[in-house]
Image (spheres, grey):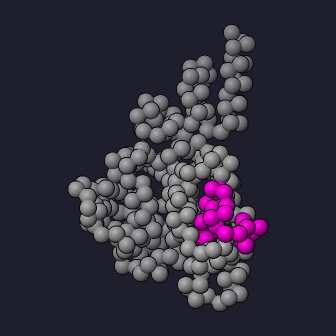
Amino acid sequence: MTTKPLVISSYWWKYATSNDWVLKDINLEISEGEFILITGPTGAGKTTLCLSMAGLIPHHYNGYIKGKVYLFGRDVSQMSSHEIARIVGIVFQDPESQFLTMSVEDEIAFALENLALPREEIRERIYEAARLVKVEDLLERAPYELSGGQKQRVAIASALAMKPKVLIMDEPTGQLDPVGKNEVVSVLERLKKEGITIVLVEHIIEEVALFADRLVLMNDGMIVYNGNLREFFKDEKNARSAGVPIPQVTEIWYRLKDIVDASDTPPITLEECEQLLKRVLEVKKIE
């Protein structure tokens, strides 16, 4: 069996209360250090896939399962929740749903104390995680006093303190204002540089597209695209039928691509869009 961080093989899942399969024949492999961006319309099965990758399914949910999810070659269904928690960290859209204590420091320490780690190691891990997401100045604050972006950074720090080999984030910017989103995106950029294996679910992908090594598009419980993000958006017809917002800079490319070389891949950053507009102006001058 492969030792890749995550391997999902012919995987199906249906909740005990569901009439239909929520996930259908999912096959996905994630390599160490990869940053995978999962997107798709509401109800596509993205959150259920996250729960499966994190081992919360089938350990904490009742339902019916076919196929396997492997963490570093081990069948998740045969691992204890304690073992999985040492390998996978998960952050949800609503950070407050994960808070259990009255200070940021205690929140980050909570899971570490459950592992009965030495006090000095717990202290080191708290400050290491806090520095990584830049919440070291918030350690004495109560989580409920923080802004949305700060709360989400604390939730990420709590997961990172466990030193997971895989970090799964389910729409961490979904409830944040633009400032909060920028805070979380900055954290993602730092984590990418750290080489952590990251699975990020996002509906609005414009802010995080630059970091993605691969795009996984889901619809109706299935993976309908698994590959290069730029190549996906190059096909305008497929992109428009995918049920996800198209980045604004890509929309500009769709309107201008007939003026420049249509073989180009679409821009995904403002800087790339700026270069595209300069080329369009140059072509227009020549004409």
* Residue 70 in which image quadrant: bottom left
Considering only vertical position in the picture, is 135 above or below 25?
below
The residue under the point 48% across, 61% down is 30
Find residue 257 and report its horizontal and vertical position in percent. Answer: 57, 24
- Residue farthest to the right? 137
Total count of labels = 0
Membership of 161 in magenta stretch: yes
* Residue 140 in which image quadrant: bottom right
Find residue 102 and report its horizontal and vertical position in percent. Answer: 63, 74
Quadrant containing the C terminus in the rendered view: top right
| Horizontal relation, residue 86 to residue 211: left or right | left
Find residue 59 and report its horizontal and vertical position in percent. Answer: 37, 74
Prevailing secondary structure of the magenta residues: helix
Part of the protein shown in magenta: 135-162
Quadrant containing the N terminus in the rendered view: bottom left
- Residue farthest to the left? 19
User: From this viewpoint, is residue 206 visible?
Assistant: yes
- Residue farthest to the top? 287
